[in-house]
Amino acid sequence: MSKRDSVPYAPLPQNPNQTVIVLPVYYHDRTRRYLRHCLSFTAVLFFLSAAIFFLYPSDPNLRLARLRLNHVRVNSSPKLTLDLSFSLIIKVYNRDFFSLDYDRLAVSVGYRGRELGVVNSDGGRVRARRSSYVNSTLDIDGLEVIHDAIYLIGDWAKGVIPFDTNTQVEGLLGLFFFKIPLKAKVSCEVYVNKNDQTIVRQDCYPE
């Protein structure tokens, strides 16, 4: 075998009775306890964040499901007045994981920025992650339309009458032994077809 093909080797210890023992590396007990504490803290923080995300109370979602114009009548004597009757259906959606008890639900209806009337509904309960529909009727008699007569006549001729609605609900969310007050309000511009009494279009803006 040539010198180029030779394999280098470590020389044997001079004392043949000498034994070399390689010990494994062990972490200190304090280091291991620190790692366990870090993992435990991270797990607790994760579950706490998830619980806050799912259980943190949020205001209910309101939507005007239907606005029906029951009847409209124009009175010319002794002065120009208007009689209106509305039927409203409000959808209240509880987004939380606990039931919602609301004291009242108030809906105001207006025409071109002028409030026509307000109707209040009794309280109720909406179960967790469920919806509830509230029916209300608003009757308005003898409303003076001197300033809005021209606009009303024009909208009546077009067949579509624009109305403004403001819906507000106040209630309490039952979170374990606590009662958390919640409030929601939504404003809508509603266009009603006077012939079939249905909503042509509505644009709502939560507040």
Image (tube, rainbow, N blue to C red):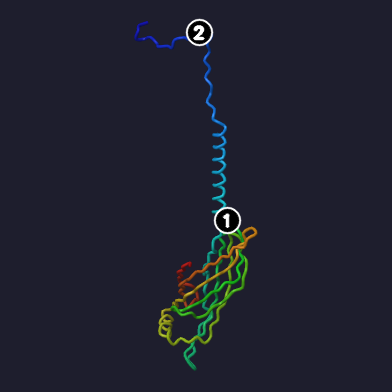
Residue under label 1: 55
Q: Give residue 15's mark.
A: 2
Residue 168 x, y percent position in the rendering:
53, 71
Disc 2 residue crowd, few under 14, some 14–19, many 20+, Cα 10 Å: few
Disc 1 residue crowd, few under 14, some 14–19, many 20+, Cα 10 Å: few
| Residue at image coords 57%, 48% | 47
Quarter-of-image position of residue 154: bottom left
The amino acid type, in three-letter code, at marker 2 is Asn
- Closer to the chain start, of discs 2 and 1, is 2
Quarter-of-image position of residue 120: bottom right
Disc 1 secondary structure class? helix
Residue 193 x, y percent position in the rendering:
46, 76
Q: Which of the two residues, 206 or 142, is positioned nearer the viewer here?
A: 206
| Residue at image coords 53%, 24% | 24
The image shows residue 46, relative to residue 35, as above or below, that is below
Residue 126 x, y percent position in the rendering:
61, 64
| Circles 2 and 1: CB atoms closer than 8 Å | no
The image shows residue 180, relative to residue 141, as above or below, that is above
Give the quarter of the figure containing the N terminus: top left
Depth check, mark 2 against mark 1: the one in front is 2
Q: Give residue 140's mark.
A: none
